[in-house]
Image (cartoon, rainbow, N blue to C red):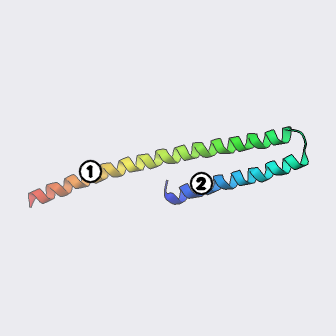
Amino acid sequence: MDDKSFQDTLNDLIGRISNLRCEQDAHTRQSAGQAGCEDVVGHAVTAIRESIDQLRLNIKYLVFDLEATRRENAYLRKLLNAQNDAE
């Protein structure tokens, strides 16, 4: 995953949290009972868990990409050293 995708996911998470806060405020003003507030909190927790799961997946992709880049770098350095030694 690239930096733009990560930033988009993070911005989406921030937007969801802001929307949930607005919804929670609206539910609290409309209803004196706790049921509406619990629903909003439940949705917030679900959204946060989904976002955390997505971030974990993104991190795994980034670590995989980093490890592959390091292996490629080591291989190319070995080739360059072999070429320099042959000269």
Mark 1 or mark 2, earlier in chain:
2
Residue shown at the point (85%, 38%) measured from the top left: 34
Q: Measured from the top left, where is residue 5 in percent x and y?
A: 54, 57
Disc 2 secondary structure class: helix
Frontmost of labels 1 and 2 is 2
Give amino acid for label 2.
Leu
Q: Is residue 28 left or right of residue 14?
A: right
Q: CA distance from mark 1 to mark 2?
A: 33 Å
**Residue on which the image places disc 2:** 10
Disc 1 secondary structure class: helix
Give amino acid for label 1.
Ala
Q: Measured from the top left, where is residue 11 in percent x and y?
A: 62, 57
- Please tell me in which quadrant of the rendered image residue 79 appears: bottom left
Residue shown at the point (78%, 53%) measured from the top left: 22
Label total for image: 2
Above or below 60: residue 22: below
In this orientation, which residue lies closer to the viewer: 85 or 32?
Answer: 32
In this orientation, which residue lies closer to the viewer: 31 or 55?
Answer: 31
Circles 1, 2 touching at the beta carbon (< 8 Å): no
Crowding around mark 2 (Cα neighbors within 10 Å: few <14, some 14 to 19, many 20+) is some
Q: Measured from the top left, where is residue 43 in percent x and y?
A: 74, 43
**Which mark, residue 74?**
1
Give the quadrant of the C terminus.
bottom left
Q: Is residue 52 left or right of residue 39?
A: left
Crowding around mark 1 (Cα neighbors within 10 Å: few <14, some 14 to 19, many 20+) is few
Residue shown at the point (85%, 47%) measured from the top left: 27
Q: Measured from the top left, where is residue 21 in percent x and y?
A: 75, 51
